[in-house]
Image (tube, coloured by chain):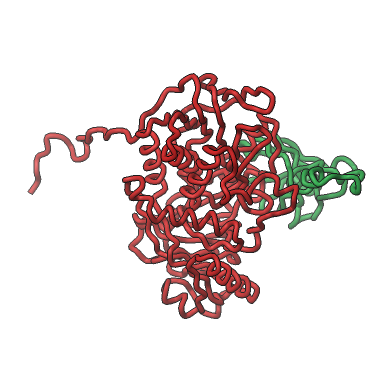
Amino acid sequence: MTTAHATPPGAALPEHPDALWRDAEPQRSYDVVIVGGGGHGLATAHYLAKLGITDVAVVEKGWLAGGNMARNTTLIRSNYLWDESAGIYEHALRLWEGLEEDLGYPILFSQRGVLNLAHTEQDVRDSVRRVEANKLNGIDAEWLDPDEVAKVCPIVNVSADIRYPVQGATFQPRAGIAKHDYVAWGFARRASDAGIDIIQDCEVTGFVTDGDRVTGVRTTRGDIGCGTVALCAAGHTSVLLDMLGVPAPLQSHPLQALVSELLEPVHPTIVMSNAVHVYVSQAHKGELVMGAGVDSYNGYAQRGAFHIIERQMAAAVELFPVFARAHLLRSWAGVVDVTPDASPIVGRTPYDNVFLNCGWGTGGFKATPGIGWAFADTVAHGRPHPLIAPFGLDRFVTGALVDEHGAAAVAH
Amino acid sequence: MQLIACPWCGPREELEFSYGGQAHVAYPADPAGLTDEQWARYVFFRDNPKGPFAERWAHSAGCRRWFTAVRDTRTHQFVSVGPLAGSEATP
């Protein structure tokens, strides 16, 4: 039996849905201009609105959340070693836990836990130490032996006959993933509803300065006056700081990620391995989402070298033999701003009314609500919020680094 | 994979090379006279341009010699390569 169709299947397109936010035109000036319409910029706008500050513009050189916010692997966790990091990341995780309600928008936050595998004696010692440090900071953390790892994630190869056998893992049950686009859209919608202007296709080309203040932001859509400037430009922060003549210890690297074709649910949690160097979760739709470390050289091209992917796939197939027949669907790269101690740079600049938020490197997504909240508070009160005070630019002079590079579950 | 033209060995695959970051970072002439601010600049701060960048590379899996390259960070393409220039030590 055949059915006659008036139009071929699929040809009748649905109505275009309503936009979630106003695509605003730039006004002459704002109390606050946020540079960068990614996750951090939009979250900062949302929390500024909650503080009653709504004469705010978010200027974005491309389209909303089209940079690293569209390219990250959506992992959310707070199991960092040092107190300073635990403070901001755990604050973020607590906000994630209530974010859907706060935004009135689904973000598909799924707390499925993260395993950080240990493959050597030193890995084991560092991991157990980190578990204890996490507990002291009120963060959920457990040390699991290989059999317990297999119970949490049955597809991990915990046999002793692989190149770097799994010696155990740390486990943070409250870690999870969220739908990155929905997060950005949820923040944008709330900020826009509160009266904040989100201005896309508006690239900053310079700054108008008067002594130690910035009085205006030059853009491809004209000059915009500003009371305060909040920089949230991630991998392109150095380009902006060069315009201001402010040096910062940032290096922009390509960071690649990739997804497989859609598969049945096989992977119930998140697995990270720094020694073998890959991390994997399975997205809601079914793709395996994988990533690893940055490409070694500086680059702004939003793509990386193939041999980096080849190595991380070798690691993935060794740890997860079941992935051997999965097909790679696509790979991409973002531009991440890496600092010498693998911790962010947030706080004051030499300009009185310019605040900096950058250096989140490979792990900025997980911090989105936390840094948005703390950065909004910083901008509103004109001083670093206590949660971000340890991350000032001055730490490279004082030597008070927050060295998460080798210390924590940071994948680099 | 990108080919990199080692000044001594000729074009070889990128994975034979190691990256050494910004070139021409001279060790301070008067180390004892530096302020904390100046030490911070020397130890931690490097240029991060979007465009041509003079860098150190080492042909680690080949002749194991360091060289200087200018590479465009917008495209990752090498503009020129040459032997180590200047008198400063290797990175």
Where does the image place residue B70, in percent across and percent down from the top left?
74, 38
Query: Chain coloured red: which letter?
Result: A
Residue drawn where x is 46% and y is 22% of the image: A26
Q: Residue furthest left?
A: A1
Nearest the eye: A18 or B52: A18
Q: Is residue A65 visible?
A: no
Residue at horizontal 75 percent and vertical 37 percent from the top? B80
Q: Colour of chain B?
A: green
At which x and y percent is residue A367?
A: 50, 51
Q: Position of residue A163 (x, y in %)?
A: 59, 73
Q: Examine the rendered structure and indicate whether residue A237 appears above or below residue A221.
A: below
> Which residue is at the front of the view, A125 or A216?
A216
User: In the picture, residue A120 is in which quadrant?
Assistant: bottom right
Left or right of A72? Residue A356 is right
At 52% across and 56% down in the image, what residue appears? A89
Residue at 40 percent of width and 59 percent of height: A282
